[in-house]
Amino acid sequence: MQAGGPNYLSAPMPKRPFVKTGGDDRQRRWKFGQNFLIDDSVIRSICEDVPATASDWIIEIGPGSGALTKQLAPRCQKLTAIEIDPRWTEKLRGQKNWGNLDIVEADAMRLDWEVLLAQHAPEPGKKPMVVGNLPYNRAAPILFNLLPHLYLCHSAQIMVQYEVAKRICSKPHSRDFSFLSVAVQNLALPEFLRKITPDAFRPRPNVWSATVRLMPRPDPVCADPLFKVFVDRAFSQKRKQMANSLQPAYLKTVTTAALTSLGLRPDSRAEDLSVEEFAGIFKILGPERPAV
């Protein structure tokens, strides 16, 4: 266990529903959302997509039994593994022959990334390559916890549910373009890598998975933290025209004028706008004003 115990990188852990102990793996998998990669060819392909060299630092989110860890650790200067399950952290600490392994027992949903990067970097200012097979039931909060700090990283290669991967990488005018697309692409440039069959996992999930690479933008398209609130409202009624879905926070006439001033159709829907166009409209309209 790292100095300070499992919580030194995060706030106190929330109370969790009672989960039986004593060998009930199904309960444990439910608790942590665990589906383990077992297909050697898939494991090898995912690791080959990580462009790490002997001088690189890798941070792996949710290594579990270490299927990826075992392949990646020997290839890099240091691998820092973030694992919430004490059963796996204990086993990973015993793998001395894999390479320079640094095990941190913590919840990736609530991880303090700035503390982690400052205290675990092999050298000051070193940017890590983040790799992670994100649990289906925790992928969104883990991703949104990481995104604001992605500029401090070289890249992030994550595995998520296939439908989520499509939304992350989607472009405007697509049925998959959503709040998630804009929120991610405001801070990163995504690249779809691989679609992965359910048969590559145990237990076998009911959905396909996919890997996505996120390259941090030098600067966000819009740095205002309230931009996400604005985008979320715009997509809250996706089938409606944006001037209607933004009501009552923004007058329809004002939104229509903003769209027109940017050369956009006044009847545009949220799915029709690029991240840059969203940022342009937000710049004109500003954040929501609290109700009086």
Image (tube, rainbow, N blue to C red):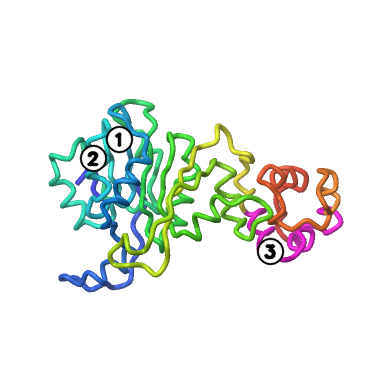
Q: Which one is in front, 95 or 224?
A: 95
x, y (%) of residue 235?
66, 60
Was residue 204 drawn as part of the magenta stretch in this picture?
no
Q: CA distance from mark 3 to mark 2?
A: 44 Å
x, y (%) of residue 172?
67, 51
SS state under label 3: loop
Residue on which the image places disc 2: 102
- Tag nearer the camera, 1 or 3: 3
Q: Earlier in the sequence, mark 1 or mark 2?
A: 2
Q: Taking 162 as reference, is 157 above or below it?
A: above
Q: Which one is in front, 226 or 211?
A: 211
SS state under label 2: strand
Amino acid residing under circle 3: Lys
SS state under label 1: helix
Q: CA distance from mark 1 to mark 3?
A: 42 Å
Side of 211 relative to 45 (left or right)? right
Q: Earlier in the sequence, mark 1 or mark 3?
A: 1
Q: Residue at x 16, y 52 (%)?
A: 90
- Residue range in magenta is 229-255
Q: Taking 26 as reference, is 171 above or below it?
A: above
Q: Taking 10 as reference, is 121 above or below it?
A: above
Residue on which the image places disc 3: 238
Q: Residue at x 30, y 48 (%)?
A: 82
